[in-house]
Image: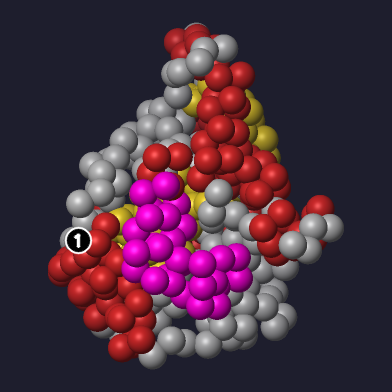
Amino acid sequence: MADKIYLRPLGIIRGQCAQQAVDEGIALRLCSGPAAFLAGELIEGEPGKAKRVVARAATLAAIGEPAIAALLERIAAPRPPVAGLDMRDTLIMGVLNVTPDSFSDGGEHFAPAEAVAHARRMIEEGAAIIDVGGESTRPGAGEVPLAEEETRVIPVVQALRELKAPVSIDTRKARIMSEAAAAGAAIINDVSALTFDRDSLATAARLQLPTVLMHALGTPERMQDDPRYEDVLLEIYDFLEARIEAAVAAGLPRERLIVDPGIGFGKTLEHNLALMEGLSLFHGLGVPVLVGASRKSFIARVTGEADVKRRDFGSVAAAIAAAAQGVQIVRVHNVAATRQGLRVWQAAMSGQSRE
């Protein structure tokens, strides 16, 4: 097979039936976690020209084609811990915006004391990671000066270092990455996948922290002007694969990388829904997958709910949809609602109160 090969797990099941299906050879384990998949969509060719075939998991495993075998191996492999956190099932990253203008909660946690109090609440509600950001990346947002972003986030990161949940720093700037790491941040979360700042790739490699590589089409100022793709799912997969390769070449091991398809960052409603439907494809990259769909405008487009704070119902549904495809991390604003929704979904899918 000369063309590029992609593989999207389908028919994802959990719990005892998943183990039984794996034991009987009719399903394959997904990321060495509680889920398995019964079939897969085999995609061959370039974005816009790809051919798609659905086959049983056992059939895929028996083909023997090296490219397919390599994808299956990556899909099945356990994901290394991130900042000491087990990646076998879905974890919650709580959003802590230290900004006056973020689309959802700008100004609410701007003061360091308010930010720390909110972080504590989110941890009590079930957040495994606290994501601190000092620059809004909502559509149309401009760049925040380096010194201003530094003033916003570094005192907060320092104040959070004693909490039991690791802190991630949501920034596009190499100096902020370095200073946040010195202040106690354990994860880097870059919406530009280490492309915005020419020093960020080398800085991330030097710091050796787990790093989230996210896809965005352009910068926040212009990303929603007229986003277009031949095949949004495959193009974003290719972009993230290239950024993984760039990070590894720079000295940041694959085991420290996480990918995020960037819901809402240079995508139309149709693009976002295509990504949500096809999230399991990204397991073929062999690293944990993070999804941030919380309160975003595609929820308003689907539901008609214009009030950002009233999109939590849709946000929980999006988090569960991501978890159902084996995503390891969901980034959310309402931690309590998300945790409750995930627990009920996990119990219902496994027939047990805890897996």
Q: Secondary structure at mark 1?
A: loop
Q: Residue at x 62, y 77 (%)?
A: 139
Q: Residue at x 35, y 77 (%)?
A: 152
As drawn, 228 above or below 274: below
Q: Hey, which residue is sitting farthest front in the picture?
A: 113
Residue 275 vs residue 114, the one in the foreground:
114
Q: Is residue 338 left or right of residue 114?
A: right
Q: Is residue 211 magenta?
A: no
Picture coordinates of residue 100 (x, y %)? 51, 77
**Amino acid under disc 1:** Gly
Picture coordinates of residue 243 (x, y %)? 38, 67
Q: Quadrant of residue 203?
A: bottom left
- Local crowd size for mark 1, using a 10 Å CA cut-off: few (<14), some (14–19), many (≥20): some
State whether residue 125 appears in this view. yes
Q: Residue at x 19, y 61 (%)?
A: 184
Picture coordinates of residue 76 (x, y %)? 40, 32
Question: Which residue is label 1 attached to?
Answer: 184
As drawn, 166 above or below 56: below
State whether residue 46 appears in this view. no
Q: Which residues are magenta?
A: 94-121
Q: Hey, which residue is sitting farthest right in the picture?
A: 304
Residue 30 vs residue 208, the one in the foreground:
208
Picture coordinates of residue 318 (x, y %)? 64, 46
Q: Quadrant of the C terminus?
A: top left
Q: Quadrant of residue 344?
A: top right
Q: Is residue 97 magenta?
A: yes
Q: Residue at x 69, y 45 (%)?
A: 313
Q: How many marks?
A: 1
